[in-house]
Image (cartoon, coloured by chain):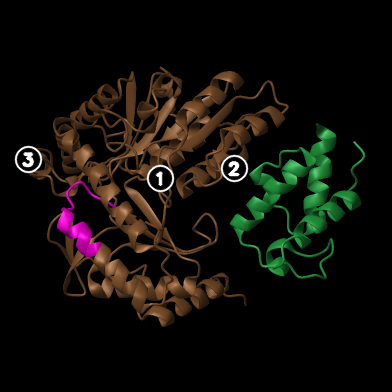
Chain colours: A brown, B green
Amino acid sequence: MTSLFSKFEGLAGALGSVVAAGGRNPFAVVIEKPVSSTVGIIEGRETLLFGTNNYLGLSQSERAIKAAQAAAETCGVGTTGSRIANGTQSLHRHLERKIADFFKRRDAMVFSTGYQANLGMISALAGKDDYLILDADSHASIYDGSRLSAAQVIRFRHNSPDDLYKRLKRLDAPNSAKLIVVEGIYSMTGNVAPMAEFAAVKRETGAYLMVDEAHSFGVLGEHGRGAAEAEGVEADVDFVVGTFSKSLGTVGGYCVSDHPELELVRLNCRPYMFTASLPPEVIAATGAALEDMIAQPELRRQLMDNAAHLHAGFTKLGLNASKRVSPVIAVTLETVEQAIPMWNRLLELGVYVNLSLPPATPDSRPLLRCSVMATHTAAQIDQALAIFGQAAVECGVPLQPEAA
Amino acid sequence: MSETVESVSALIIQKLLANPKVPRDIDGNCKIMEDLAFDSLAVMNFVMEVEDSLDVSVPLDKLADIRTINDLAACIVDLKNKG
């Protein structure tokens, strides 16, 4: 009889080679204890964290910790139900109002994770006669949402407004609604979407536009509302989706919109309806972290300064870092044979980053993906850079410093 | 619309052979993922190139039923005829 697990044989072989090449499983790293937002204990050693997406360091926010404690004491530790049944407490509605006000939108929906926000909004909005037009490098949650929807799904070339326009024009479907989905900052590469140009395409073609600001919320724009704010085109965005699990340091997802029909989406959105809502302590901590973010715009400036510091350091070392400076900086290596030992050596020397291997990377080359925090000190960034330099030399990764 | 499954299949093979990693002896019955060792992302990216050559949109859900080069060609001819 066929084994249920025979389909995993290829994966088992691939994982075996990755472990054999480096001595440990990069996808099973345990942070034994967080010491601060920037340091954790891994394999018994204090390790600099450069791969946690905790952009503003708010996972350790005093205000959020106190709010979580107070909420757990007054409301308990779980809701035991879905948002449309018994799982909505006044805390949930209060947070939705706060998020909507922050984005200057009519209303917000709060989901249990960012993944579910994309899954839920895309599958609820795009019906079988509609078209979803996705950036080719979209996050898995966007692809999964498109599979859960009954819509026709078309990809356009990553970050290319011209290609988006061409593919929208190619569709001969005047009676179908079209929903374009892009991300503010792409999670693997740190690429930033050309939002003004996408907004122009949206206006010209009459499509709807959804932006996933998961990695750009709290990061881009004067107030931290993301890539659309940074380029002054928020009015063209129909739906903003995002997560609390990066800049706000907790967990959960949201969608904000001015469309009054958002109220009806609540009743047509399986990943919202058929899962338990977030527990009171998470909702309270998220609201407090949002207050922290609003009260400390200097965190955003420090974050971008730190990103520029790390990026300049990589360039000076001669590593191939992302072109644009953003809090996600991916160092591209040429081969998996270089990337695995280098990632392991970085961890041994005290720096944790994310190892991304093809096909989960856009151009079939491996990435050492770093995320910067506002709370990293200049000394920590310099230390990480020194360790990158040492590991690169020890692992035979070619360095090509720019001519001075 | 003068495209036939044979002509589209020939064009797909010609485009595939431009990639030096693709085996030289492919024909329309080759399975795209198994025989050409394409992962799911490579298949989607390749289909994008074919879409541009033939000015057609192939929705992603159609890819689930496509295994061979001829399947892809038949799907494209069908989509073009509907247009």
Q: Amino acid at mark 2?
A: Arg
Q: Residue at x 31, y 69 (%)?
A: A389
Is residue A374 in the magenta section?
yes
Residue that mark 2 sits on: A157
Q: Please state if A330 lies on the left or on the right of B80 as rendered.
A: left
Task: Sort mark 1 into few (<14), some (14-19) or many (20+) by Cα contacts within 10 Å.
Answer: some
Chain for disc number 3: A
Give the percent coordinates (x, y) of residue A209: 50, 27
Task: Sort mark 3 into few (<14), some (14-19) or many (20+) by Cα contacts within 10 Å.
Answer: some
Q: Residue at x 83, y 49 (%)?
A: B74
Quadrant where the N terminus of chain A sits is bottom right
Q: Please state if A228 lies on the left or on the right of B41 as rendered.
A: left
Q: Please state if A340 lies on the left or on the right of A92 as rendered.
A: right
SS of the residue under disc 3? helix
Q: Is residue A298 visible?
A: yes
Q: Residue at x 36, y 45 (%)?
A: A325
Residue that mark 1 sits on: A324
Same chain letter for marks 2 and 3: yes
As drawn, the residue found furthest toward the right would be B2
Which image quadrant is residue A130 in?
top right
Q: Is residue A287 visible?
A: no
Chain for disc number 1: A
Front of the two marks 2 and 3: 2
Say which of A302 and B43 sits in front. Answer: A302
The magenta-colored residue range is A371-384
Give the percent coordinates (x, y) of residue A75: 12, 38
Residue that mark 3 sits on: A70
Front of the two marks 2 and 1: 1
SS of the residue under disc 1? loop
A280 over A312 or under it: above or below: above
Say which of A372 and A280 sits in front. Answer: A372
